[in-house]
Image (cartoon, rainbow, N blue to C red):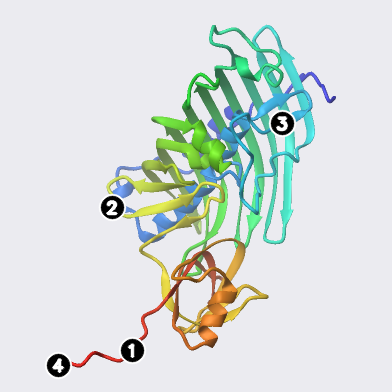
Amino acid sequence: MKTSIFTSIPNMLVVGLLALAMSACTLGDVSDELNNNELTAEEMEEASQIIGQSLSDDNDGVFSSLNDALSNVSSDGFTTSAFQKGNSNDHDYSGRGDENNYQYHYDPETGTHTISFERSVTEENFRKNMSALLTYVFTDINGEYISRPRAERERIESIDFTSDKSGNMQNRHRNGEFSRADTFSIDGVSDATAILAIDGKHYGNGTFHGVRGNGNTFQRTYSNKIDFLDIQINKGVVAENGSLDEGVTGTLSYELNMYKNNNGDESTKTVSGTIQMNGDGTALLRFKNVAKMFRIHLQSGIVTDDDAEIEANVIGIDVENNTVSLENDILVIITERTEVEFDDGLNSLQDVQRAIAAGLTVQAEVEGYRNPDNKREFIADEIEFEMGDDDNDDEEDDD
């Protein structure tokens, strides 16, 4: 059992708020001219990627904190909550369950459970390091503190939770550093109710290096604030699917400040809008006064844009290397994070390969971004295969 009393731990929430204030002071005031009405397509891409990272479970965003808040906590670590089966994804980059330097303290006067730990994930195309300080106050239906939340899980009705995290992440062509603070108030934890109600706030700041769909890279320093409006979690859906983000519905509002420096000329863009949870592991990102929407995948933070995709016939498949050659001279790279869908009787890359060898037409719809180092290569966030129209079909006689 690892037990340690904290004597002096900096509160990163305060640090984050100070960083927001300092950023605003050093980078200039936001004028009325810098608003959503003047968002460029490039700025929307940049903002959507930053917000996607801020929500992502894999990247220690809001959904990472929600999972932490609902985990069973004790002096020797985390276990999955009573209504979760664990993460069902084949590639789970959250790092949950592999904490290092885990420390725990309970204060009976305030009912506060305080823990700190580090998480590290190292995969072929994904790396991150993160340190966290979390606090929990568990109460029963009468408002009494619960000192042994794992042993007395059935008594828990409400959880007051805070999370302060800082770290860095890097995947294929995208990387960043971040500090994030979350505060949640959760009601309906016991089996007496089927729905969890959550009120909360998120504050974050950091630097993000990203890639636009056309392969151009960008770097932005940012600060953001996210407010929960009517967030609920269906415990039955979560238990059935084994994924917290698939049971969440409701709306978030956000305000994002993006800062950039061009040869000493500093500017700030303020972006605001809403995020609608779909209850299927995704959310729709809306910008205020802008009709265009983006879809965020809450586990990975990947953002897709239905209006910006490549659609072409497939002329070749390399199953071993997970690449797809398209007739427009684009080579699509399928990574372990790519969401692959098959239609029209196709069930695998091997099926696509056999169909092409048989002279059939197979189309691919791809969303993602061009490789900054090779514009002919397209890194797929999503790819869907379907049988194409056969232009060689005999036409019916007019008579």
Residue 78 circle label: 3
Residue under label 4: 399
Q: Residues within 10 Å of mark 3 (few under 14, many from 20)?
A: some
Could you tell whether 54 is left or right of 73 in the image? Answer: left
Choose the circle earlier in sequence order: 4 or 2: 2
Return the x and y of residue 34 as percentages of the image width and height.
34, 47
Up the image or down, 69 lies above or below 160; here it is below
Residue under label 2: 291
Task: Determine the CA span between mark 4 and mark 3.
Answer: 74 Å
Can I make out residue 338 in this image? yes
Q: Secondary structure at mark 1?
A: loop
Q: Residues within 10 Å of mark 4 (few under 14, many from 20)?
A: few
Q: Residues within 10 Å of mark 1 (few under 14, many from 20)?
A: few
Residue under label 1: 393
Name which residue type carries label 1: Asp
Q: Secondary structure at mark 4?
A: loop
Choose the circle earlier in sequence order: 3 or 2: 3
In front: 308, or 315? 315
At 40% across and 55% down in the image, what residue appears?
Answer: 44
Q: Nearer the viewer, mark 3 or mark 2?
A: 3
Name which residue type carries label 3: Phe
Task: Determine the CA span between mark 2 and mark 1.
Answer: 40 Å
At 73% across and 46% down in the image, what residue appears?
Answer: 120
At 52% across and 54% down in the image, what residue appears?
Answer: 302
> Where on the picture, by quarter, is residue 115?
top right
Can I make out residue 374 in this image? no
